[in-house]
Image: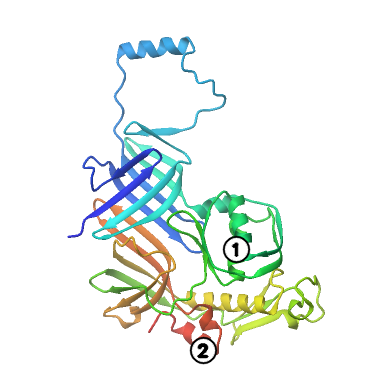
Amino acid sequence: MDTVSCKLKLGAWEIDTKDDPRTELLQVLTERGMNSPAGRCEVSLFVTPAAKPGLLEQAVGAAASALGIGGGGSSGPPKFSMDVRGLAVAHDDAMEITLSNGDRSAKVMTAKVDRVTGHQGHVRFSGRATLAAAARARTDRVFLSQGMAQIAGDLATDAGVGTGQIDTGDTYPYFVADTAQTVFDHLLSLAQLEGMDLYDDADGAIVMRRFAKSGADRKLYHGIHLLDARVYHDVTACDRVQVTGEGPSSSGGSQKWHHLLKDPATVQSTAGQGSGARLLARSAARSSDAVERLAKGRLGAALDGATRGTLRLLGDPTITLGDAVEVTSAPWPEANGVYKVVHVRHRVVKRDGYVTTLGVTGMGGSDAAGDMLGAALGAVAGLL
């Protein structure tokens, strides 16, 4: 039987359950998702109370307090913290979680402590993911003639977070980010313009990538890896997307500023065919290439979302957001197929062991939306 272990950094406290038989860990839970700031983690411990000082120590402490010794001279309320094995864990302390199951090991989350709850020695430290910090931050910026990666990097810096892999994107004559929306909202808008997914990686860095995989990264065999699979195949509510940009940049030059157009046909693009149309207008899309890319990206996301499901499997820390997984050998043919991982949940608890739950969608994407087969591929997205 494979051995499950956890390496945890919680403020100044570190533990590896493989080497520490005195572990206080009761449960570890991590969740990360695409295009959402709701990523979180929870670490539950049993913290034994510290030994009470003797009468002599109490008397010495009272005398020192009366004389002002060790007062620290700090103004304002003290920062809340809790001792774990004599080390203080406080709000905004870093949390790093690495999980292992047999020979598979990977860091699954980096976060910061934002809540501490306790009840009779049972203490839970909750952490927020990187995108949660971006969802709390606001900025006022106007970007002129800058590339997508540069804009994303500057927005992340304003939110106090780092960037990881960011695919190459377009250069925008102008892109406005104001305090009416959060930094996360602006990053998501930028990602949608480029047909990319927005998420944070296991190191806590912001990632913006296009999904362009044609095959599976991993095969999940029913009865070996897979414990349960639930897949829903809906009729897509959107089979056609029409996008209108601003200004005929393709013919008049990207520096032309046109706020009102008599005929918007020169900056319009339509992807897909059907009656379920979605109409979008984006001022940042100032060329025919930009509106076409946005139309294909939004249609691809709608087609993918028509097929969605939940896969529950034996704990695997190596599967991450943006992976393509193939379900095979399932006795129900509608569950077999290739899927895109859009949500990952790891849970380690002494009673149930280590279980990974994947949220998945179909795997058509903007490539499927780019030709006449897009609607057909969306109807069977995720199936081989």
From the viewer's perspective, tell me whether residue 224 is left or right of residue 193.
Answer: left
Question: Please, what secondary structure does the residue beneath circle 2 have?
Answer: loop
| Mark linked to residue 264 | none
Contact, mark 1 vs mark 2 (Cβ under 8 Å): no
Question: Above or below — where is 161 with respect to 80?
Answer: below
Question: Which percent across, then down, holds residue 71?
Answer: 49, 18
Question: Above or below — where is 74 with respect to 38?
Answer: above
Q: Quadrant of residue 99?
A: bottom left
Query: For the residue marked with disc 1, what is the amino acid?
Result: Ala
Question: Please, what secondary structure does the residue beneath circle 1 have?
Answer: helix
Badge 2, how many Cα within 10 Å: few under 14, some, many 20+? few
Mark 1 or mark 2: name the one nearer the start of the chain.
Answer: 1
Badge 1, how many Cα within 10 Å: few under 14, some, many 20+? some
Q: Quadrant of residue 178?
A: bottom right
Q: Nearer the viewer, mark 1 or mark 2?
A: 1
**In the current view of this chain or complex, which residue is farthest to the bottom?**
372
Identify residue for label 1: 149
Identify residue for label 2: 373
From the viewer's perspective, tell me whether residue 182 is left or right of residue 318.
Answer: right
Q: Residue at the location (46% across, 17% down)? A: 70
Question: Which percent across, then down, holds residue 42?
Answer: 39, 48
Query: For the residue marked with disc 2, what is the amino acid?
Result: Leu
Question: Which percent across, then down, holds residue 175?
Answer: 70, 63
